[in-house]
């Protein structure tokens, strides 16, 4: 089974839009089409982004939905090991996620981050967009 990391931007987007490809990614994970892995601190980062006043104002997500989503991630996503960043990205947080994903034997990192998408591959890890990954799930 495919082992996949969804970047924080993808996890947040899945809750902000019920019709976007990111929501389809979460639905596919919940159906058991792939294993979702999360980096150390990534769920806390999702919670922090969703709690930002700007996000709360623009996207009125019911607190119960937010809490249920975070609980689902904590209960069912597989944690990645800590790993030192490889120094491949402009953003050190991206380096950390790349290293953790590689150390955890992840097949794909799904992201909307242009810096990560520009890398394309890191060792055995393929870095792709949500739409690209959805085509892999349903050829």
Image (cartoon, rainbow, N blue to C red):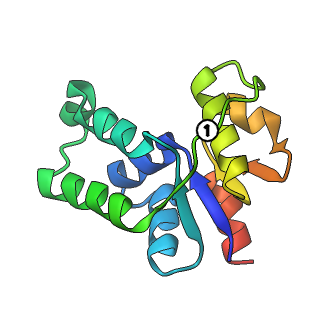
Query: SS class of the residue under badge 1?
Result: helix
Which quadrant of the structure image shows residue 77?
bottom left
Q: Name which residue lies at 86% across and 46% down.
A: 123
Nearer-the-camera pick, 105 or 25 = 105
Q: Name which residue lies at 68% across and 61% down.
A: 133
Nearer-the-camera pick, 38 or 82 = 82
Quick check: 1 left or right of 47? right
Nearer-the-camera pick, 20 or 127 = 127
Which quadrant of the structure image shows residue 135?
bottom right
Quick check: 87 left or right of 101? right
Circle 1 packing at 10 Å, graded few (<14), some (14-19), many (20+), is many
Picture coordinates of residue 80, whole percent (x, y): 56, 52
Residue bearing mark 1: 97
Q: Name which residue lies at 44% across and 50% down.
A: 11
* Number of numbered tags placed on the structure image: 1
- On-image quarter of the N terminus: bottom right
Nearer-the-camera pick, 95 or 80 = 80
Say above or below: 18 vs 136: above
Quick check: 75 left or right of 118? left
Spot the residue most to the left: 63
Say above or below: 104 vs 122: below
Spot the residue most to the top: 90
Picture coordinates of residue 66, whole percent (x, y): 23, 52
- On-image quarter of the C terminus: bottom right
Picture coordinates of residue 7, whole percent (x, y): 55, 44
Which quadrant of the structure image shows residue 115?
top right
Quick check: 122 left or right of 132? right
């Amino acid at each position: 089974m495919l082992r996949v990391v969804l970047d924080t931007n993808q996890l947040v987007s899945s809750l902000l839009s019920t019709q976007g490809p990111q929501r389809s990614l979460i639905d596919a994970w919940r159906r058991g089409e792939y294993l979702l892995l999360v980096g150390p601190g990534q769920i806390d980062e999702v919670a922090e982004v969703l709690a930002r006043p700007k996000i709360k104002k623009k996207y009125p997500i019911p607190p119960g939905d937010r809490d249920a989503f975070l609980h689902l991630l904590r209960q069912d996503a597989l944690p990645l090991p800590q790993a030192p960043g490889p120094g491949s990205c402009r953003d050190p947080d991206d380096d950390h996620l790349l290293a953790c994903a590689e150390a955890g034997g992840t097949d794909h990192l799904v992201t909307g981050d242009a810096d990560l998408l520009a890398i394309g591959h890191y060792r055995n890890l393929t870095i792709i967009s949500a739409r690209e990954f959805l085509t892999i799930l349903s050829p």
